[in-house]
Image (tube, rainbow, N blue to C red):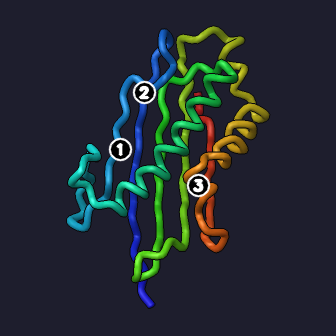
Amino acid sequence: MSTRTFEFRLCSSHGAADPASDELLVEFHADSGDWQAQHPSLSTPGFRLYLLSLLLCQHFYLVANAQERAIPLQRVEGTFTVITSSDWILEQVNGHFRLTLDPGAPAEELARADDEAIAFISRRMKLCPVSRNLPAAVEKAISLELAEA
Protein backbone atom coordinates (compact mmCIF):
# COMPACT_ATOMS: atom_id res chain seq x y z
CA MET A 1 0.00 0.00 0.00
CA SER A 2 1.41 3.39 -0.94
CA THR A 3 1.38 6.50 1.20
CA ARG A 4 0.90 10.20 0.63
CA THR A 5 3.26 12.79 2.09
CA PHE A 6 2.30 16.39 2.81
CA GLU A 7 5.03 18.85 3.75
CA PHE A 8 4.69 22.34 5.15
CA ARG A 9 7.10 24.93 6.45
CA LEU A 10 6.37 27.91 8.62
CA CYS A 11 8.20 31.07 9.58
CA SER A 12 6.94 33.76 11.94
CA SER A 13 8.59 36.91 13.18
CA HIS A 14 7.90 38.55 16.51
CA GLY A 15 8.53 42.06 17.81
CA ALA A 16 9.46 43.26 21.25
CA ALA A 17 6.48 45.62 21.45
CA ASP A 18 3.99 42.88 20.56
CA PRO A 19 5.34 39.34 20.93
CA ALA A 20 2.42 37.87 18.99
CA SER A 21 3.30 37.04 15.41
CA ASP A 22 4.07 40.17 13.38
CA GLU A 23 4.37 38.12 10.21
CA LEU A 24 3.49 34.54 9.45
CA LEU A 25 4.37 32.63 6.30
CA VAL A 26 3.16 29.07 5.78
CA GLU A 27 4.19 27.20 2.65
CA PHE A 28 3.09 23.88 1.17
CA HIS A 29 5.43 21.65 -0.83
CA ALA A 30 3.45 21.08 -4.02
CA ASP A 31 3.69 18.09 -6.33
CA SER A 32 5.55 20.37 -8.77
CA GLY A 33 8.39 20.61 -6.25
CA ASP A 34 7.70 24.28 -5.57
CA TRP A 35 6.94 25.74 -2.16
CA GLN A 36 3.62 27.60 -2.37
CA ALA A 37 2.57 30.26 0.12
CA GLN A 38 -0.71 29.34 1.76
CA HIS A 39 -3.58 31.80 1.98
CA PRO A 40 -6.51 29.67 3.16
CA SER A 41 -9.83 30.49 1.53
CA LEU A 42 -13.04 28.78 0.51
CA SER A 43 -11.21 27.32 -2.49
CA THR A 44 -8.46 25.68 -0.39
CA PRO A 45 -8.82 21.88 -0.45
CA GLY A 46 -10.50 20.73 2.77
CA PHE A 47 -7.84 18.19 3.71
CA ARG A 48 -5.13 20.83 3.33
CA LEU A 49 -7.14 23.12 5.64
CA TYR A 50 -7.23 20.31 8.19
CA LEU A 51 -3.45 19.87 7.98
CA LEU A 52 -2.92 23.62 8.21
CA SER A 53 -5.05 23.64 11.36
CA LEU A 54 -2.73 21.01 12.90
CA LEU A 55 0.33 23.11 12.11
CA LEU A 56 -1.14 26.45 13.15
CA CYS A 57 -2.51 25.07 16.41
CA GLN A 58 0.98 23.87 17.33
CA HIS A 59 2.44 27.27 16.41
CA PHE A 60 -0.24 29.11 18.41
CA TYR A 61 0.45 27.03 21.52
CA LEU A 62 4.20 27.51 21.12
CA VAL A 63 3.95 31.31 20.85
CA ALA A 64 1.28 31.66 23.56
CA ASN A 65 3.32 29.63 26.04
CA ALA A 66 6.54 31.48 25.18
CA GLN A 67 4.62 34.70 25.90
CA GLU A 68 3.36 33.25 29.19
CA ARG A 69 6.98 32.67 30.20
CA ALA A 70 7.98 36.13 28.88
CA ILE A 71 10.50 34.58 26.49
CA PRO A 72 11.60 37.21 23.95
CA LEU A 73 10.96 35.57 20.60
CA GLN A 74 12.35 37.00 17.40
CA ARG A 75 11.52 34.18 15.02
CA VAL A 76 9.91 30.74 14.90
CA GLU A 77 10.66 28.34 12.07
CA GLY A 78 8.94 25.02 11.64
CA THR A 79 8.70 22.04 9.37
CA PHE A 80 5.69 19.78 9.39
CA THR A 81 5.31 16.47 7.60
CA VAL A 82 2.13 14.42 7.54
CA ILE A 83 1.99 10.92 6.11
CA THR A 84 -1.31 9.31 5.20
CA SER A 85 -2.35 6.02 3.70
CA SER A 86 -3.31 6.01 0.03
CA ASP A 87 -6.91 6.56 1.13
CA TRP A 88 -6.04 9.71 3.12
CA ILE A 89 -6.07 8.21 6.64
CA LEU A 90 -3.50 9.93 8.87
CA GLU A 91 -0.61 7.70 9.90
CA GLN A 92 2.17 10.05 11.05
CA VAL A 93 2.51 13.68 12.07
CA ASN A 94 6.06 14.99 12.47
CA GLY A 95 6.84 18.58 13.36
CA HIS A 96 10.02 20.35 14.27
CA PHE A 97 10.10 23.93 15.54
CA ARG A 98 13.12 26.16 16.13
CA LEU A 99 12.97 29.30 18.28
CA THR A 100 15.27 32.26 17.73
CA LEU A 101 15.42 34.71 20.60
CA ASP A 102 15.52 38.49 20.22
CA PRO A 103 19.25 39.32 20.41
CA GLY A 104 18.41 42.83 21.64
CA ALA A 105 16.56 41.56 24.71
CA PRO A 106 18.18 41.97 28.14
CA ALA A 107 20.21 39.00 29.39
CA GLU A 108 17.72 38.23 32.17
CA GLU A 109 14.93 37.87 29.59
CA LEU A 110 17.06 35.67 27.33
CA ALA A 111 17.88 33.47 30.34
CA ARG A 112 14.17 32.61 30.68
CA ALA A 113 14.52 30.33 27.65
CA ASP A 114 16.28 27.62 29.63
CA ASP A 115 15.88 23.85 29.21
CA GLU A 116 12.99 23.76 31.69
CA ALA A 117 11.10 26.48 29.79
CA ILE A 118 11.59 24.72 26.44
CA ALA A 119 10.38 21.45 27.99
CA PHE A 120 7.37 23.31 29.46
CA ILE A 121 6.45 24.75 26.05
CA SER A 122 6.85 21.32 24.43
CA ARG A 123 4.49 19.77 26.99
CA ARG A 124 1.96 22.53 26.53
CA MET A 125 2.06 22.18 22.73
CA LYS A 126 0.76 18.64 23.22
CA LEU A 127 -2.44 20.19 24.61
CA CYS A 128 -3.34 21.70 21.23
CA PRO A 129 -6.97 20.58 20.76
CA VAL A 130 -6.53 19.78 17.08
CA SER A 131 -3.67 17.38 17.83
CA ARG A 132 -5.45 15.91 20.84
CA ASN A 133 -8.31 14.91 18.57
CA LEU A 134 -6.10 12.81 16.32
CA PRO A 135 -6.83 9.08 16.55
CA ALA A 136 -4.57 7.23 19.00
CA ALA A 137 -3.13 5.14 16.16
CA VAL A 138 -1.52 8.21 14.56
CA GLU A 139 2.21 8.43 15.35
CA LYS A 140 2.93 11.95 16.62
CA ALA A 141 6.36 13.52 17.06
CA ILE A 142 6.68 17.23 17.72
CA SER A 143 10.07 18.63 18.70
CA LEU A 144 11.18 22.07 19.80
CA GLU A 145 14.67 23.51 19.98
CA LEU A 146 16.35 26.79 20.69
CA ALA A 147 18.48 28.16 17.84
CA GLU A 148 22.12 28.77 18.65
CA ALA A 149 22.80 32.35 19.69
Q: Residue shown at 72%/44% (left/top)?
A: 123
What's under tag 3, amino acid-wise?
A: Ser
What's under tag 2, amino acid-wise?
A: Ser
The quadrant the N terminus occupies is: bottom left
In the structure shown, which secondary structural element does the residue marked by tag 2 occupy?
strand
Question: In the image, is residue 56 above or below residue 32?
Answer: above
**Label whose residue precedes the other's in the sequence (1 or 3):** 1
Instruction: Check residue 131 in the rendering and tell me which mark sits there, or answer none.
Output: 3
Q: Residue shown at 69%/23% (left/top)?
A: 69
Number of the front mark, 1 or 3 = 3
Instruction: Check residue 102 in the rendering and tell me which mark sits there, or answer none.
Output: none
Q: Residues within 10 Å of mark 2 (few under 14, many from 20)?
A: some
The residue that disc 1 covers is 26
Could you tell whether 138 is left or right of 32 in the image? right
Q: Nearer the viewer, residue 131 or 114?
A: 131
- From the top left corner, tell me how far across and down residue 13 is, in percent: 42, 27
The quadrant the C terminus occupies is: top right
Q: Nearer the viewer, residue 62 or 53?
A: 53
In the structure shown, which secondary structural element does the residue marked by tag 1 occupy?
strand
Q: Residue shown at 43%/57% (left/top)?
A: 51
The residue that disc 2 covers is 13
Residue 122: quadrant of the picture: top right
What's under tag 1, amino acid-wise?
A: Val
- From the top left corner, tell me how far across and down residue 39 is, in percent: 26, 43
- From the top left corner, tell me how far across and down residue 11 is, in percent: 41, 38
Could you tell whether 57 is left or right of 65 in the image? left
Number of the front mark, 3 or 2 = 3
Total numbered labels: 3
